[in-house]
Image (spheres, coloured by chain):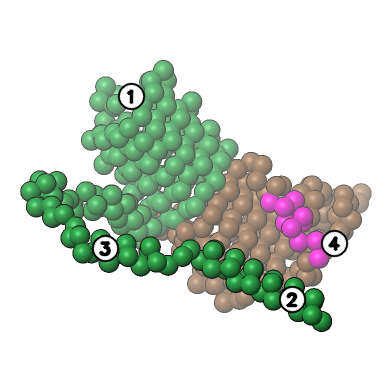
Chain colours: A brown, B green
Amino acid sequence: MARQPALRTVRCYHCSKEFEVGAKAITVSCPHCYQRVAIEDMVVRSSHSGGKVQTCGKITIAERARFTAMSVQASGGLEINGVLNASQISTDRIHLGPGGRIRGVCRARSLTMAQGAQIENSYFEIGADRPETATAKDQTEKPGQEPPLHAA
Amino acid sequence: MPDSQITIIASDARFNGEMHFEGTARIMGACEGSISTPGTIEIAKGGRCNARVDAQRIMVDGHAEGELIGRERIELLPNAHVRADIAAGNLIVQDGASFVGHCSVGPDAVAKAGASSQQRRTAPETPSSRPEPQPEAIETRPVRPASPSVKVEAAAPAQHTPPKADLQSDWMRLAQGATDTQKRTG
């Protein structure tokens, strides 16, 4: 009997619709909007800066790592144990670890913070309907955007 | 603290102004203005608060607007709808809560918020603390009538100088006349 392939559900960062992909897939085309989407999980372990970072997976910023970017979109969530400095942050769930620091305009479904985490004078939109509106806004605002830079 | 010692703003109550508690306050009605306590403030489900809230701990399960300063922590419970600027030592946002606004979390954030609020408090007091000119001094000062010579000096050139508009119109007339004569002769 053939083994069923392991699947996982991801949310497209272009159209905000969910679909299933193979557990080991890195990039696919969204079956709803037909756009190419990156679905890999990213881990930032040292100091790194990037322009626009998009993924349907999860971005983890390790302890003592510093990540600076123009825009960060992680449909799978964001775990911050180091420092994240970005103009626009859009994600599903944000978890700030004990040494986590965040700065930027941030839209997410939920936010959890450990004791000792810091938010540096940022604008937050936390709530159930926020990420969809954020992605839609991003799309309308930047029609001729530069190609996304995937970094880890 | 037992329930009997909690100050409760009931659901049918509406408060507008400045409040200070020593213990815990539970807001189930509507509040506007400024609320401060060294203890805990709970904005219960159905409660509405459009105020500057400064407390050790703030728990929100209703609607809150304005400014929230939680020196120890701010907790947004599942029914919380917050549209405010937050400064807190620690922030807990439970699933279902919504929050829109500027946010600073950490020990420095609370210190900065405290400093800024101190400035705001002292800022309106400074104009009132300045010594105002006393009306009695103005009354007792002898009022001297203006000297007639000054009046004449000021009035004399005004009589002799014709208004600018008249001068201009005269020059225009002269120029027009000159051009007319030139046309006739030419």
Q: Position of residue B58 (x, y in %)?
A: 38, 40
At mark 2, the secondary structure is: helix
Chain label for disc 4:
A
Q: Amino acid at mark 1?
A: Ile
Q: Main secondary structure of the magenta part?
A: helix
**Residue beneath the point at 38% across and 20% down:** B13
**Residue beneath the point at 38% across and 58% down:** B109
Q: In the rendered view, would you say A67 is above or below B147?
A: below
Please tell me whether mark 2 or mark 3 is closer to you in this view.
2
Mark 2 or mark 3: name the one nearer the start of the chain: 3
Q: Amino acid at mark 4?
A: Arg
Task: Look at mark 2 in the image and give the residue it sits on.
Answer: B181
Task: Look at mark 3 in the image and give the residue it sits on.
Answer: B152
Q: In the rendered view, would you say B80 is above or below A7?
A: above
Q: Residue furthest right?
A: A1
Q: What is the spatial separation of the Cα atoms under label 2 and label 3, in whole angstroms?
A: 44 Å
Q: What is the spatial separation of the Cα atoms under label 1 and label 2, in whole angstroms?
A: 97 Å
